[in-house]
């Protein structure tokens, strides 16, 4: 009954999200994040605290429009500049006018999807999931990797734009649309994940993944840990030393006689 009532309450909301928010490119990974969060909650159902999956649900909240507008414009300009600079030095006839790239006789507009804000948001979520699944407990390493995901996402977006420039130059403007454009988006996330794994391995050379265990304090003789033990177990070492010393003295007396 409880599950049925929950389904009746949730299913209309789910279909509404599918038709509105999750249908956009910015929030297209919403169903995946929801499924992963529910899986993490199921894995941690016997624990008191379930903060990781609850924190993971924050990535389902759409970013404010004012924030997207303020951050997207400089990101598009930066991605366009770096991609144009690299391709020009590679020998391709590429020029830039704002966020419009001139590739030979073609023009390529760097849209908001190529700015990198959405990929930063998504790769950040995947990075937190990656650290949670591997059981990383070192706060310094987790924070460092989470911060480094931001430039990693930027580099992945530059790679995506460079792939689109190559496709446009060699195959024409029509080839850049459709499947090739979507394939470049998949390459973006593949490049981001590979760069994140490489960065994690490099961090492992300097920062351990888990916090070192806290050393237990040394116990002194007669401490509270020894209370309740038999007296012979606590003073057995002294009795053996006394017996050995007495035996040596008798031997010395016999030899002198």
Image: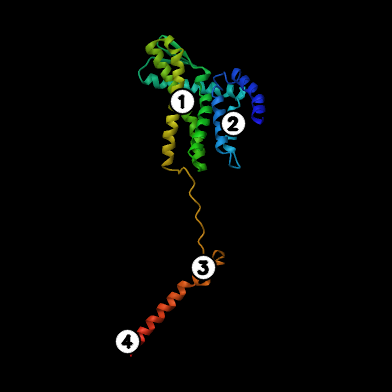
Q: Is residue 32 above or below residue 139?
A: above
Q: Is residue 112 above or below residue 50?
A: above
Image marks 1 and 3: residues in contact by CB distance under 8 Å: no
Q: Earlier in the sequence, mark 2 or mark 3?
A: 2
Residue 255, labelled with which disc? 4
Percent x, y of residue 56: 57, 33
Find the distance from the CA under tag 4 to the CA under tag 3. Answer: 38 Å
Q: Secondary structure at mark 1?
A: helix
Q: Earlier in the sequence, mark 2 or mark 1?
A: 2
Instruction: In this rendered view, identify the residue nearer to me: 171 or 83.
Output: 171
Choose mark 4 or mark 3, whichever is in front.
4
- Label 1: which residue? 189
Residue 57, labelled with which disc? 2
* Residue drawn at the location 40% of the way across and 77% of the way down: 244
Check the image and name the residue furthest to the front. Answer: 1
Percent x, y of residue 86: 40, 22
Identify the image quadrant of the N terminus.
Answer: top right
Q: Residues within 10 Å of mark 3 (few under 14, many from 20)?
A: few
Instruction: In this rendered view, identify the residue nearer to me: 137 or 168.
Output: 137
* Residue drawn at the location 53% of the way across and 19% of the way down: 112
Choose mark 1 or mark 4, whichever is in front.
4
Identify the image quadrant of the C terminus.
Answer: bottom left
- Label 3: which residue? 221
Instruction: In this rendered view, identify the residue nearer to me: 213 or 103.
Output: 213
Tell me where residue 162 sits by quadrant.
Answer: top left
């Amino acid at each position: 009954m409880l599950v049925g009532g929950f389904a009746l309450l949730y299913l209309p909301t789910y279909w509404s999200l599918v038709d509105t928010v999750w249908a956009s490119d910015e929030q297209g990974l919403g169903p995946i994040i929801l499924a992963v969060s529910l899986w993490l909650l199921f894995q941690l159902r016997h624990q008191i605290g379930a903060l990781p999956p609850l924190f993971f649900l924050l990535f389902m909240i759409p970013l404010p429009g004012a924030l997207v507008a303020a951050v997207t414009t400089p990101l598009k300009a930066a991605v366009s500049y770096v991609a144009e600079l690299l391709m020009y030095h590679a020998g391709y006839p590429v020029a830039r006018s704002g966020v419009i790239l001139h590739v030979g006789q073609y023009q390529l507009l760097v849209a908001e999807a190529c700015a990198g804000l959405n990929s930063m948001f998504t790769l950040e979520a995947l990075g937190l999931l990656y650290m949670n699944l591997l059981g990383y407990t070192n706060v310094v390493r987790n924070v460092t990797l989470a911060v480094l995901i931001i430039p990693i996402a930027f580099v992945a977006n530059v790679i995506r734009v460079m792939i689109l420039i190559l496709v446009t130059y060699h195959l024409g403007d029509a080839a850049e649309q459709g499947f090739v454009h979507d394939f470049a988006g998949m390459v973006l996330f593949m490049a981001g994940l590979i760069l994140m794994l490489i960065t994690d391995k490099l961090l492992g050379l300097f920062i351990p993944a888990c916090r070192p265990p806290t050393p237990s304090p040394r116990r002194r003789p007669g401490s509270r840990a020894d209370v309740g033990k038999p007296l012979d177990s606590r003073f057995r070492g002294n009795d053996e030393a006394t017996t050995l010393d007495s035996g040596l003295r008798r031997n010395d007396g016999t030899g002198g006689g």
